[in-house]
Image (cartoon, helix red, strand yellow):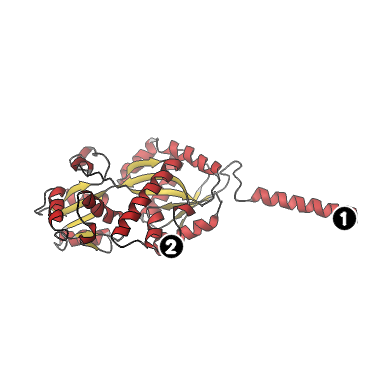
């Protein structure tokens, strides 16, 4: 009887060992299997594209240790994707691509999940936001608009793709810094970047705030002009003449970034792996060529820097959205 009991204990011990070895939390020889990357958006969108570009870049640079499978979960403004990642807990084989919605959605009350329910891994790139007017607009620089707003905050109507958004922040933040009451500025949301540009070129809206990539083709065609860009420093080449907010003495810069996150309890060893791997990737010619191909700009931040800057961004966004009545 005693021998039978001992055998049972031995078997139970072996089973427990096997379970422990197969646990998703194990980072021995990480990564040693396929990595699932959840894009918090639809196929072809920005969050899907960054997931696929990172995958492509790792392969081309011969830095990919395990293949990616990309899963699109764009429902609920990305909330479905964040709920999925939160349930992964400490699984280092599930990653998420997301934008600043990772904290904005919690602020406006569409989800209880915020930056505490993800592990920041890397900010990979950014686009910049611009103020755009029609080619024949009477406005020739952004300060003329700000001066009119200072005199009457409802004097100029702006268009954006969605509210709340970085496009909207690119209107309200510089205006606030300039001494304008942001609660009185008329900002109209349209369905998409394309619809937004149609409204501008049709003369239905005076100024739009949108991504540089949405505007540049219309500028090159001679239909529109860019008055300001949200980059922290002056850009080079054909974009060198576009004033930044900082060059106008307005202490504002806004990154329209895309980043990679892990589940809330992602093991430190896995985070360290991605710090090293992605830190190496962004230095390669392959990555730089892909940035240029997609009209993106380098804004890489490792896990620690990304986490710190996310917290700073969240505070700024929360204060501003609260001041205009959009925070829960």
**Residue 286 in sight from this viewpoint:** yes
Q: Quadrant of the C terminus?
A: bottom left
Count neighbours of disc 2 (C-alpha within 10 A) and say few if under 14, some if 14 to 19, many if 20 or more. Answer: some
Q: Position of residue 71 (x, y in %)?
A: 47, 57
> Mark on residue 4?
1
Q: Quadrant of the N terminus?
A: bottom right
Q: Is residue 185 left or right of residue 73?
A: left
Tell me if residue 1 comes above or below residue 230 in the rendering.
below
Counting residues from the start of the chain, the first of labels 1 and 2 encountered is 1
Examine the image and state in which quarter residue 88 appears.
Answer: bottom right
Q: Position of residue 142 (x, y in %)?
A: 16, 49
Examine the image and state in which quarter residue 171 appears.
Answer: bottom left
Relative depth, front residue between 152 and 167:
152
What is the distance, in whole Å, between disc 1 and disc 2 at their CAs?
53 Å
Cβ atoms under marks 1 and 2 closer than 8 Å: no
**Residue 214 in sight from this viewpoint:** no
User: Residue, x 47% and y 39% (percent of image)?
Assistant: 275
User: Residue, x 11% and y 52% (percent of image)?
Assistant: 139
> Mark on residue 106?
none
Q: Position of residue 145 (x, y in %)?
A: 14, 52
Q: Is residue 72 left or right of residue 126?
A: right
Q: Which residue is mark 2?
A: 111
Task: Please count the marks in the image.
Answer: 2
Examine the image and state in which quarter residue 283 appears.
Answer: top left
| Mark 1 residue element | helix
Q: Is residue 169 left or right of residue 275?
A: left
Relative depth, front residue between 72 and 175:
175
| Mark 2 residue element | loop
Kindly report which numbered mark, 1 or 2, lies closer to the viewer in this rendering.
Answer: 2
Q: Position of residue 157 (x, y in %)?
A: 17, 60
Count neighbours of disc 1 (C-alpha within 10 A) and say few if under 14, some if 14 to 19, many if 20 or more. Answer: few
């Amino acid at each position: 009887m005693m021998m039978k009991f001992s055998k049972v204990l031995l078997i139970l011990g072996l089973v427990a060992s096997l379970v422990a070895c197969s646990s998703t939390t194990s980072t021995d020889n990480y990564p040693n299997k396929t990595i699932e990357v959840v894009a918090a958006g639809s196929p072809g969108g920005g969050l899907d594209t960054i997931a696929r570009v990172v995958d492509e870049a790792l392969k081309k640079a011969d830095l990919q240790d395990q293949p990616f499978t990309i899963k699109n979960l764009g429902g609920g403004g990305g909330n479905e994707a964040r709920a999925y990642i939160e349930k992964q807990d400490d699984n280092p084989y599930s990653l998420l691509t997301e934008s600043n919605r990772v904290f904005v959605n919690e602020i406006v009350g569409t989800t209880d999940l915020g930056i505490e329910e993800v592990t920041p891994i890397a900010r990979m790139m950014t686009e910049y936001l611009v103020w755009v007017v029609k080619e024949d607009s009477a406005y020739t620089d952004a300060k003329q608009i700000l001066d009119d707003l200072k005199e009457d905050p409802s004097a100029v109507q702006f268009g954006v793709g969605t509210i709340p958004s970085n496009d909207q922040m690119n209107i309200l933040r510089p205006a606030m810094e300039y001494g304008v009451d942001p609660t009185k500025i008329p900002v109209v949301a349209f369905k998409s970047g394309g619809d937004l540009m149609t409204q501008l070129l049709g003369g239905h809206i005076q100024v739009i705030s949108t991504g540089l990539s949405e505007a540049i083709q219309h500028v090159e065609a001679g239909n529109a002009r860019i008055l300001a860009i949200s980059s922290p420093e002056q850009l080079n080449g054909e974009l060198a003449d576009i004033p930044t907010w900082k060059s106008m003495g307005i202490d504002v810069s806004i990154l329209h970034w895309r980043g990679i996150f892990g589940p809330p309890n992602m093991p430190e060893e896995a985070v360290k792996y991605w710090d090293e791997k992605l830190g190496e990737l962004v230095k390669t010619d392959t990555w730089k060529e892909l940035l240029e191909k997609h009209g993106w700009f380098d804004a890489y931040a490792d896990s620690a820097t990304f986490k710190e800057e996310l917290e700073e961004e969240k505070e700024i966004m929360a204060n501003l959205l609260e001041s205009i009545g959009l925070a829960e």
